[in-house]
Image (cartoon, grey):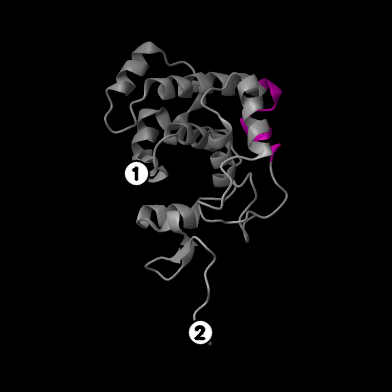
Amino acid sequence: MSGPVNLAPGFERGPDGVARPAWANGNELMRDYYDSEWGFPVRDERGLFERLSLEAFQSGLAWSTILVKRPAFRRAFANFDVEMLAEWGEHDIEQLLLDASIVRNRPKIEATLNNAQACLKLREHGGLAKLVWTYASTQPLTVRSHPEAPSETDASRELARELKRHSFRHVGPVTIQALMDATGVAGIRDGVS
C-alpha cells in the first residue's frame, strides 16, 4: 500500500482497523451489531416485528441503549411472539412497567401489544413481511454516516402511512426509516443475498 486510505466523511477505523460509520464504533456491541446485523435482510414476521418494536422503543434514545437491553426486551416480551403478545392486557402492561431491565414507557409498551394485534390482522393481507418488503429498494444500501443519512424518505413516509392504516402505532417515518435501513429494506449491503 502506498499510503493511508482516505475514509468517507463520518467513517472511522475501529480498534480492529475496520472502517465503519462513527455510530457503529462506539463499543464492541455496536461494532458486532453493525458487522453482523445492520443492513442485512430480515424477511420473517417475528424478526421484523422485533425490530419494529425495538425501533419504536428507541425513539428519543440512543440505539446503543436499546441494543444493550435487547436480551431483556426479548425476555420481557416473550421473544416477540406476535400471537402471545396479542393476548396480553393491562396486567401484563403493569408487570412490564415494573421491569427495570427494559425501557418502561407505557405508550411504547401499549403500542407493542397493539402492534402484535395489528400484525395478526395483517396476515389476512399477506402479513408484515410482505407489506414491509413491498417498499424494498432495488439499489444496494449506501452506508453513510449518521449526519449524511436521511432520517426519512418518501418510502418510509409511505410505509408509515400504510402501517398506520392497518392500526399500527409508534410507526412514524423516522422510526420506519431506521427499520428499513437496519433490515435491508432500504437496500441490502454489498455481498449479502
Residue type for callout 1: Val
- Range shown magenta: 124-135
**What residue is pinned by disc 2?**
3
Q: Which mark is residue 68?
A: 1
Name the residue located 38 percent from the left edge and 40 percent from the top edge.
66
- The quarter of the picture where the C terminus appears is bottom right
Residue extending furthest top? 90
Give the distance between the C-alpha atoms of the residues marked 2 and 1, in whole angstroms: 37 Å
Can you tell which of label 2 and label 1 is closer to the viewer?
2
Instruction: Pinpoint residue 62: horizontal percent, then vertical percent.
Output: 39, 42
Disc 2 secondary structure class: loop
The reply to whether the magenta stretch includes residue 130 is: yes
Q: Majority secondary structure of the magenta segment? A: helix
Image: 66 above or below 29 = above
Disc 1 secondary structure class: helix
Would you say the residues marked 2 and 1 are in contact, meaning their CB atoms lie under 8 Å apart? Answer: no
Residue type for callout 2: Gly
In the rendered image, which quarter is residue 190 located in? bottom right
Please state if 163 lies on the left or on the right of 3 as rendered: right
Callout 1 environment at 10 Å: few (<14), some (14 to 19), or many (20+)?
some
Instruction: Pinpoint residue 136: horizontal percent, then vertical percent.
Output: 69, 42
Name the residue located 36 percent from the left edge and 24 percent from the top edge.
105
Q: How many marks?
A: 2
The reply to whether the magenta stretch includes residue 116 is: no
Q: Is residue 84 visible?
A: no
Q: 150 and 37: which one is in front?
A: 150
Residue extending furthest bottom? 2
Instruction: Pinpoint residue 139: horizontal percent, then vertical percent.
Output: 71, 53
Instruction: Pinpoint residue 110: horizontal percent, then vertical percent.
Output: 44, 19
In the rendered image, which quarter is residue 103 located in? top left
Q: Earlier in the sequence, mark 2 or mark 1?
A: 2
